[in-house]
Image: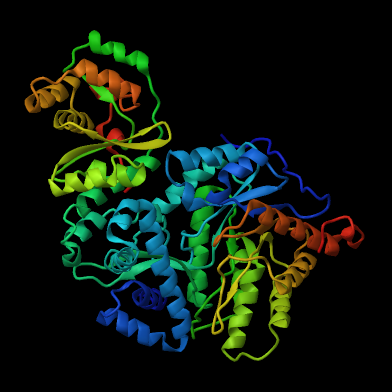
Amino acid sequence: MSSLAAQQQALLGALLAPPRSPQSQTATAHFAPWARGLAAYQANGHALAERCLRAAYPVVAALVGEESFASLARDFWHHHPPVRGDLAHWGDTLAGFVADSPQLADVPYLADVARVEWDFHCAADAPDGTADPASLALLSSADPAQLGLRLPPGTAVLCSEWPVASLVTAHLHGHPTMDTVAQQVQARQGECATVWRQGLRPRIAVCTHATAALLQTVIDGGSVLAGLQAALATDGGFDLGAWLQAAVQDGLVLGAGPLEDLKPDAAASQPG
Amino acid sequence: MPCATPINAAPSLPGGPAVGIGWRHAHYGELLQTRPTLDFIEVHSENFFAPGGAALAVLRAGLEHYPVSLHGVGLSLGSAIGIDDWHLDQLARLVEVIDPVRVSDHASFARGTLPAAVQPLTVHAADLLPVPFSVEALDVMCANVQRVQDRLQRPIAVENLSAYLHWEEADMTETQFLNSLAQRTGCQLLVDVNNIYVNALNAQLQGAPGEPLAGCRQWLDEMASSPVAEIHLAGHAHCGDIVIDDHGSRVCADVWTLYRHAIACFGAVPTLIEWDTDVPALDVLLDEATRARGNAAAVLRPSVMQEAAFS
């Protein structure tokens, strides 16, 4: 390692290594003459961590409270430091960090809320999709086994044992009411959530297990037929036509096309 | 869509510098609605790396009315492990989409490695950390700047830092470091006048001899022959034991004094008002921009002092 690389590693260690780790203590001692300056950089890092995570996870922040969230952000900063210079991409592993945290064990739905919020955050920055309603005519003429649905880039689904979509929309949009969502949590009323972008507006909605099965199949690159079969396996009464009409209206389905023209990772892509 | 014929491309004060403001989230809507007279707007490149969505749409809308200066905070030009390929790819794509009037970043590092159990972990501290003014650090920064310029097919401007710690190892002064960087790579320089002043105040707090303003004037004099592409002006916070470049208040009187000295040194260089913390009403930024025009005019054409809104 060059001397410059070693110098830079020492400073990064003082700023990013977990505070009581040997690495941090050694690095901090190295910069003892500049303790006040080092503290300024450390404080800036912590403030930045809190600000960035709060932007991506406003509901997690509301659920754990200001002080706990600030502490969570600082811990996360040191245990999962950024790897890139665009902090919009930092925070993708928060759900796992939350799930592994003993201090947050009394909020068992927090990790799933974090997963939904990260999907929501990523959908906001996903590539723009263009609606092509005319292409939906293919659904009545082409082989559904060779046909796929085009979803807005960034579309994601998540099924949870907790009312994750309601928890998020109650905080972000005021519906359902907090009382209602508290009752849902009490009853451990599971939900599936769909996250997508309608135009420039990220959206989240509760969906049925059948819809979630269909969407996940499509996101994974499956055909309309495979998606329908997955939905019917969950709910024998699933009505594809009715669902499609609503999905097109909500901007969740942009069009249809031959499977080979639809890249599965285009719909499910997330900044990585 | 690149802005082929930028509106307000000419300085609003004839003979004076182009003056712009940092365009932040709080003013996205108001600026587009009111379209105040500005010569350019500046945005942080990383905030628009996303391939789609509202942020990029807003930037495209802004581009219809103002030239855009792209100012980065994350390239880590001083990093010993080099530039992140991904970061450079995103910047190159944004530059292609926006066709900015200038592209800039800092003479700093943030990217490096931390020891880990299996293999070193590459991290990015998301800050503007100082590099030593050493031959080795200069070589590294020259290589990184050259790589960026080769990729973007244009010169970039590199900004001096406000630094809160300093490395013992030094083969040269900061001005020698920056001048050499410009000479060796053909890059331009971005002179942040407030950063010079903040460093001088912090040096004074550390017991350094000399009067801060005099040291800052000397710093600017030593850069007089350099290709300066943009000047930044901002406020800072004096915390008693340290001065922080927080971009959270109006430009102070001493920094205006130094700005006039900078204009005398460098000429009518495009000038930016930065405000990133506790962002005030748009009118406050526009008032600072007017002050910048007035201060520059006082140096370039003393007779226009009374015409410009110099205060």
Residue B228, quarter of the rendered image: bottom right
Work out whether residue B53 or residue A62 is closer to the camera in this orientation and state it.
A62
**Which residue is pictured at 69% across the width and 77% down the height?**
B216
- B15 or A260, which is in the foreground? B15
In the image, residue B124 sits, relative to residue B208, either above or below, namely above
Q: At 61% across and 90% down in the image, what residue appears? A: B208
The percent coordinates of residue A61 (x first, y second) are 32, 57
Q: Nearer the viewer, residue B81 or B130?
A: B130
B16 with respect to B200 (left or right)? right
Q: Is residue A197 left or right of residue B66?
A: left
User: Residue B172 location, x and y as percent?
Assistant: 58, 80
Q: Is residue B205 above or below residue A61?
A: below
Relative side of B181 to B220, left or right: left
Quarter holding residue A69? bottom left
Q: Residue at x 38, y 73 (%)?
A: A5
Determine the residue located farthest toward the front in the rendered image.
A179
